Amino acid sequence: MADPRDVLSPALSAAIARALGPDFEGTDPVLRPSQYADVQANAALALAKRVGANPREVATRVVAELGDLPAAVEISGPGFLNLTYDDAWVTSLLGDLAADPRLGVPVQETQVVPIDYSAPNVAKEMHVGHLRTTVVGDALARTLEHLGHRVVRQNHIGDWGTPFGMLIEHLLAVGENSEEALLLESDPNAFYQAARAQFDGDEAFATRARARVVALQAGDEETLRLWTELVGLSRHYFNRIYSTLGVTLTDDDLAGESTYNDDLAGICDELEAKGLATISDGALCVFLDGYTGREGKPQPLIIRKSDGGYGYATTDLATIRHRVERLGADRCLYVIGAPQALHLEMVWKTARLAGWLPDHVEVVHVKIGNVLGEDRKILRTRSGAPLRLMALLEEAQANARREVDASRPELPEETRAAIAPVVGIGAVKYADLSVAHDSEYVFDLDRMLAFVGNTGPYLQYATARIHSIFRSAGEPPSYDAPITLGEPAERALALRLLSFGTVVAEVGDSLEPHRLCTYLFDLAQDFSGFYEHCPVLKAATPELRASRLSLAALTLAVLSRGLDLLGIETPPQM
């Protein structure tokens, strides 16, 4: 444990139990940064009411039971405990951190964690609405893996259903090797819209499309071959987006709706046999206690439509059963838009009643808020269409190139060309991750690309600045030299570094990547204060120079590791 709070919290908890009696055993005091000391504990204020005593009296009793601590303790105000860490202790903890290849990040008890994220539709353009689920889901996958969990990425693409009859017939009409077919790799919406226009304007085509759906669902070999080709062309498009975004999804992570097609009839039969599903207006439905729709009528979860077709509810039930029974899930994450909350709740409750989702398996909806335009409405093009994700990413890279050209014209052209995509994509991802995932945010490229404030480029520049220090020093980054802490800015930076592992663990528990963003921004600001007040290359002595170079290198390691967990690259110069 490198974080001083992780060491002191149990000692305080034990002192509280000794001072106030066994009823208070396990009380976990909250330690927060203080303007008077390194941390402040305010447990006495909350405990005073329970024991009917003055808070300062409670604080005095707790201090008397503390014994030797690697920190000075002082009672202040109405009963706060201010703790100031010993310099020698902080330095020893910093040495432990430097010697730890994991930089203080714990390895948690391993869980199997399927994560459902991204989930675009075959033959449709990914739009800005897919940005957040893809970026947030990938950051969580990276973080949980780093914490020691076995993450199973589940890209639940829309690759089945009635639209595929229309799409297959259009593929046959234009030719499988035609330029129009290749639109599925570059402009899927154009292909889809052309197929839709034929379906709406040509009754003979529409009849063939409907028949093709029946053939697809019946497993017709030629129809399945054409469907596979459609999915394959779209897969190339998805991979181009994922490569541009730098996310870790691969073809091996595809787990589309078609995966569960053979299970759907059995799902319905089992729910009916268990008395959980009943026929209502020709459809097979589950009615759950406590779920009502308009006018107070029971809200149905439709398992099989009146025409015999299956919907999202059936597929989602098959999905959760698969993730529990075949993947061995301990915790299932669904990184999906916030409006799907009711649907997911009903699916999970049905799955628990059916015995497919045991009580020990946790299911979590990581709710994703909307991306807004300047008008604070869902971000769209001027025509009102959903904004193409690739167009947005291309614009971010182009704007970043202009920023890099303007700020670093002396760099070689090929260097600027390499930096711009890293900065542009990093800016978009960080802007998304730095706000709570269930909140909305306004998409503003100018603000995202700023080199000041809580932005991706600011953090990337902090790492580039440290690389620059070592280029000037003529040596690679290393934190082997002993670190001494003589200046307040050195101490502030050191204490921030020591809390890295705690923050990463908190992200894994809370599933909130913005906590890591906040930490990294604070760390970059602490480094800026250190750089301003503590000369590194011109330090007073060789030992102090080596100490500050070590502190800079350790900061670089933590910043780089933290940004990598978010899926953001760090260029060596900017």
Image (spheres, rainbow, N blue to C red):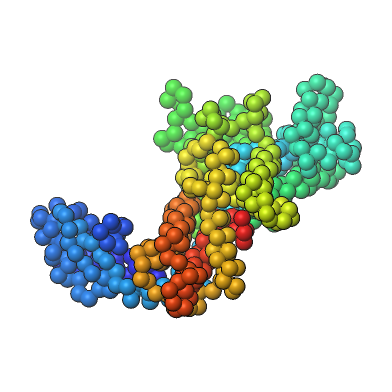
Image quarter hosting the C terminus: bottom right
Placement of 58 over or under 409, stated as above or below: below
Q: Is residue 32 left or right of residue 499?
A: left
Residue 217: horizontal and vertical position, in percent? 75, 40
Quarter of the image containing the N terminus? bottom left
At x 27%, y 66%, the residue is 84
Q: Residue at x 54, y 30 (%)?
A: 374
Confirm whether residue 361 shows in the render: no
Q: Is residue 439 visible in this depiction of the protein?
A: yes
Total numbered labels placed on residues in the image: 0
Q: Residue at x 42, y 36 (%)?
A: 289
Q: Nearer the viewer, residue 257 or 274?
A: 257
Q: In this view of the protein, which residue sits in the foreground, 365 or 1?
A: 1
With 347 as the anchor, is 87 left or right in this view? left
Picture layout, residue 450 above or below residue 533 = above
| Closer-to-camera residue (533/272) | 533
Q: Is residue 255 above or below residue 107?
A: above
Relative to 346, is 520 above or below? below
Relative horizontal placement of residue 485, taking residue 265 as reference (left or right): left
Relative image position of residue 48 (x, y in whole percent): 14, 55
Query: Residue 278's spot in the image, x, y percent?
Result: 54, 35
